[in-house]
Image (spheres, grey):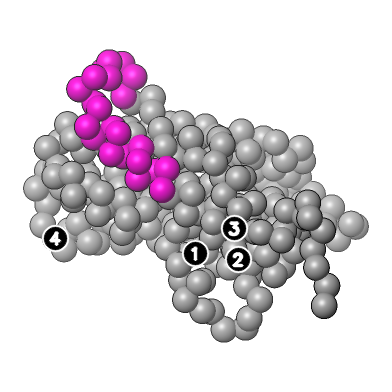
């Protein structure tokens, strides 16, 4: 029987995942959802409806869509369709993340929990950090990571909802861009030409695509323009030669 070294971080992957998320990732989601909580309070949404939307929807674009439809008095089916289309963009994240953490062929309940908790923050960390984490520890690590940022988001939404009256009006909208800004900094930390070109092409194409379709513009722009930048930047050649 083998034992892990006393200082081995992967002997307790849940603890390591919590520590990895407890800094900037959790703060990014905290402040982003603080803005959402403040916005829903300003729209007279019930606090339990607001918290329920965070738990069940758990996607900032879909949450923004949900709150907008709710404020204008849209019906339940209109709300369902709007949130469904806004959340379709999460499917590529789930498809690319699950194979990195699974140890069995068939998905288990832990995989469905991970998929529900998956956010762009966890997705990017799974793509960047999976190689350095032992396969048997990945599911526990990233589930703990996801639960930590999820709990931070819930707390942030609650703080925003009840604390908006104490917050200057000029500071409320900027809270919503903290998470995209954090993700942008993560992408820029990957020092590869393919990554830079993907970012530039996506930023150039997205305004036009979002004007064409709010539901599909982000997904098509991210996938199409990002892939184009990746290919032009020699992403496939680098991978083949490594």
User: Quick check: 75 above or below 176?
Assistant: below
Tag 1 and tag 3, C-beta contact below 8 Å: no
Marks 1 and 4: CB-CB under 8 Å?
A: no
Cα–Cα span, label 3 and label 2 = 9 Å
Question: The C terminus appears in which quarter of the rendering?
Answer: bottom right
Task: Name the N-terminal-most of marks 1 and 3.
Answer: 3
The residue indicated by pointer 3 is: 14
Specify whether 93 is left or right of 34: right
Say whether marks 1 and 2 touch (CB < 8 Å): yes
Q: Position of residue 20 (x, y in %)?
A: 62, 45
Q: Which one is earlier in the sequence, the residue at label 1 or at label 4? A: 4
Q: Residue at x 73, y 53 (%)?
A: 9
Q: Which residue is denoted by mark 4 in the rendering?
A: 76
Q: Distance between the residues labelled 1 and 3?
A: 13 Å
Q: Is residue 155 magenta?
A: yes
Q: What stretch is highlighted in magenta?
A: 151-172
Q: In this view, does 144 lie above or below 60?
A: below
Q: Name the residue under label 1.
A: 114
Residue positioned 35% across, 41% down in the render:
155
Q: Nearer the viewer, mark 3 or mark 2?
A: 3
Write down the residue under mark 2.
139
Q: Is residue 130 left or right of residue 166?
A: right
Of the numbered discs 3 and 2, the one sitting upstream in the chain is 3
């Amino acid at each position: 029987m083998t034992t892990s070294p006393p200082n081995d971080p992967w002997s307790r992957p849940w603890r390591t995942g919590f520590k990895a998320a407890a800094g900037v990732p959790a703060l990014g989601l905290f402040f982003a959802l603080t803005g959402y909580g403040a916005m829903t309070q300003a729209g007279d949404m019930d606090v339990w409806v607001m918290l329920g939307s965070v738990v069940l929807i758990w996607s900032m674009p879909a949450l923004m869509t949900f709150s907008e439809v709710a404020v204008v008095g849209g019906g339940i089916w209109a709300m369902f369709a709007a949130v469904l289309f806004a959340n379709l963009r999460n499917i590529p994240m789930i498809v690319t993340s699950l194979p990195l953490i699974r140890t069995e062929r068939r998905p288990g309940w832990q995989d469905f929990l991970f998929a529900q908790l998956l956010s762009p923050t966890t997705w990017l960390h799974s793509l960047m950090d999976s190689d350095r984490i032992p396969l048997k520890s990945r599911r526990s690590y990233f589930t703990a990571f996801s639960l930590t940022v999820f709990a931070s988001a819930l707390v942030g939404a609650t703080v925003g909802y009840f604390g908006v009256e104490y917050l200057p009006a000029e500071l409320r909208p900027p809270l919503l861009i903290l998470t995209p800004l954090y993700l942008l900094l993560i992408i820029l930390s990957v020092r590869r030409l393919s990554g830079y070109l993907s970012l530039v092409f996506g930023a150039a194409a997205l305004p036009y695509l979002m004007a064409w379709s709010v539901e599909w513009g982000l997904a098509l722009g991210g996938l199409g323009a990002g892939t184009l930048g990746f290919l032009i930047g020699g992403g496939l050649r680098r991978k083949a030669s490594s």
